[in-house]
Amino acid sequence: MPVVATKDQYQNAREHMVMKQLQERGISDPRVLDAMRRVPRHEFVTSDLHHLAYRDCPLPIGEKQTISQPYIVALMSQMLRLSGHERVLEIGTGSGYQTAILCALAGQVYSLERHARLADHAADVLARLGFDNVEIYVGDGSQGLPDMSPFDAIIVTAAAPALPGPLRTQLNTEGGRMVLPVGDDKEQYLEIVTRFGNRWQIERTTSVRFVPLIGRYGFRATRSEKDDDDQATV
Ligand code: SAH
């Protein structure tokens, strides 16, 4: 695992978060708990939100997007069952916090974000913290990253209307695992998809609420999201 500052003023807050929000709710993978203890979540939000960074909730990160609640980050990471050598694809870099946790848990991480501004900012924070096993791309993650496939694990941190076909086929054929929220704008469930050859086993788990996956195999952009995109490219 890369070197990250573990001795900072929020160390106790992180320890408390791990105990109360994660362990007491059943997160038990020691590698996940260790990563959550070490990665400084406050570095992934603006300084006015630092004091809220270890609370049990999502926080705004700009572009109408949010950094996920710590428990959900830990839960999805645990569901991937990473042991350290895997090639992982993440869709929805956002703040880069989940990306950092994946860097700590796997071998190489590829992360895709549709908002260039968020992708650039996340890449800067990750580099500053010393995470060097990650490549960040700007684009429509619902189409995956075929050139870099197959992936041992795929995580989608935005809600899809259905399992995106390209992501399914970019999973490693020998037990590749994907975790993603599937549903509409009101109700979504975390699904765990495991691939064995050309068979995909799907397990539907807990109910969650994510921002939408916008793209060819996701939801269509609303007018206001298209306007935001236009502004983002100016
Ligand atoms: N894991 C992130 C969550 C960010 S919210 C964090 O904890 O910070 C979900 C992110 O998915 C947003 O940044 C949004 O812009 C991005 N997103 C939505 N649709 C996408 C798509 N088709 N491809 C890539 N990123 C997408």
Image: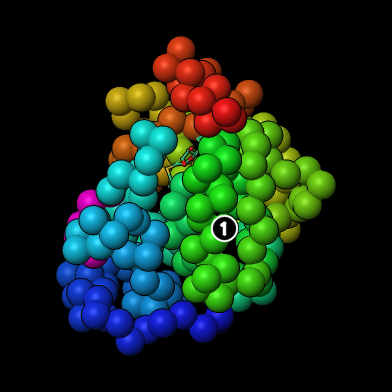
Residue 130: name its quadrant.
Answer: bottom right
Residue situated furthest top in the rendering = 223
Seen in the picture, residue 202 relative to 174 is either above or below; the reply is: above
Residue at 55 percent of width and 22 percent of height: 230
Magenta stretch, residue numbers: 54-58
Report the colour scheme.
rainbow
Q: Nearer the viewer, residue 121 or 153?
A: 121
Q: Residues within 10 Å of mark 1 (few under 14, many from 20)?
A: many
Ligand 1 lies under 8 Å from the Cβ of mark 1: no
Task: Look at the numbered disc 1 and give the secondary structure of its residue.
Answer: helix
**Left or right position of 226 against 30:** right
Residue at 36 percent of width and 71 percent of height: 40
Residue 55 among magenta residues: yes
Q: Residue 211, image x and y in percent?
A: 39, 34
Which quarter of the rendered picture does the C terminus lie within?
Answer: top right
Which quarter of the rendered picture does the N terminus lie within?
Answer: bottom right
Q: Residue 104, image x and y in percent?
A: 52, 73
**Mark 1 residue type:** Ala
**Left or right position of 139 against 78:** right
Q: Residue 9, image x and y in percent?
A: 24, 80
Label 1: which residue? 123
Q: Is residue 207 visible?
A: yes
Q: Nearer the viewer, residue 233 or 165?
A: 233
